[in-house]
Amino acid sequence: MSWLHDKQKQEKWTDFVQSLSPDIDPQAVRLMDEMRFVFRAIFHVGDQSLDEAGLSFAQYRVLMHLFFAEKMGSRGILNPSEISDRQGVSRNTMSSLIRNLEDEGLVERRLDPDDRRRFNISLTENGRSLVTDYARQHLATMGQCFSVLTPDEQETLSQLLRKVRTHVEVIRQQCSESIQE
């Protein structure tokens, strides 16, 4: 039986967390754990759906952002800062991802002609082919993760997650400001 389905372990965990922070709402502890389990499970499913492509989920998302920039944007290039902002990861993490994709011949890095201090990243033909070959299968797998919910439930979940995300961003900003003081 997994941790998530073992009521006794959950109660012990909640009691432990409350011993450290008596004011925390036990439901908040359960929600944090539930969200963490769901996020990790979706992440692992995403990784597994890309095993055959030889990519991690994070690498694939970089390629997808570049592919989107080509197909829907006004240009087929992004700089590393734009990609890290879109993925919500640090610039150091993004640099490592881009370097690995470049080593695999899936992306190219070129100096920005308007600002020689910056680089622009674009897909190579191999990167474009890889994204095209695996997009349908990967997206179908990701869609299956939410197929258990009705369309109305999916919309409700989306609204609730946006609400939590907006609130967490405020808290994150407040934490950042208090650290700087």
Image: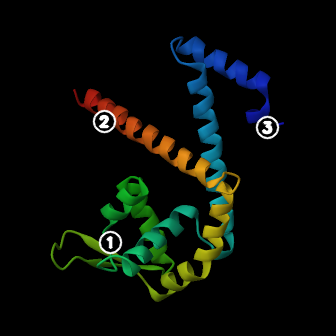
**Mark 3, residue position:** 2
Residue sitting nearer the eye, 1 or 114? 1
- Mark 2 vs mark 1: which is more N-terminal? 1
Residue at the spot 60% in from the left edge and 40% down from the top edge: 36
- Mark 3 vs mark 1: which is more N-terminal? 3
Secondary structure beneath label 2: helix
Q: Is residue 115 left or right of residue 74?
A: left
Q: CA distance from mark 3 to mark 1?
A: 42 Å
Residue sitting nearer the eye, 177 or 163? 163
**Mark 2, residue position:** 173
Residue at the spot 48% in from the left edge and 45% down from the top edge: 159
Residue type beneath disc 2: Gln
**Mark 1, residue position:** 78
Q: CA distance from mark 2 to mark 1?
A: 26 Å
Secondary structure beneath label 3: loop
Q: Is residue 34 above or below residue 120?
A: above
Residue at the spot 17% in from the left edge and 74% down from the top edge: 116
- The image quarter in which residue 33 lies: top right
Q: Which image quarter holds the N terminus?
A: top right
Residue at the spot 61% in from the left edge and 76% down from the top edge: 136
Secondary structure beneath label 1: loop
Q: Is residue 34 above or below residue 59?
A: above
How far across and down, in percent of the image, does residue 82 sit?
A: 32, 63
Circle 1 Cα neighbour tier, 10 Å, few/some/many (<14 / 14–19 / ≥20): some
Residue type beneath disc 1: Leu
Q: Which image quarter holds the C terminus?
A: top left
How far across and down, in percent of the image, does residue 17 sit?
A: 59, 19
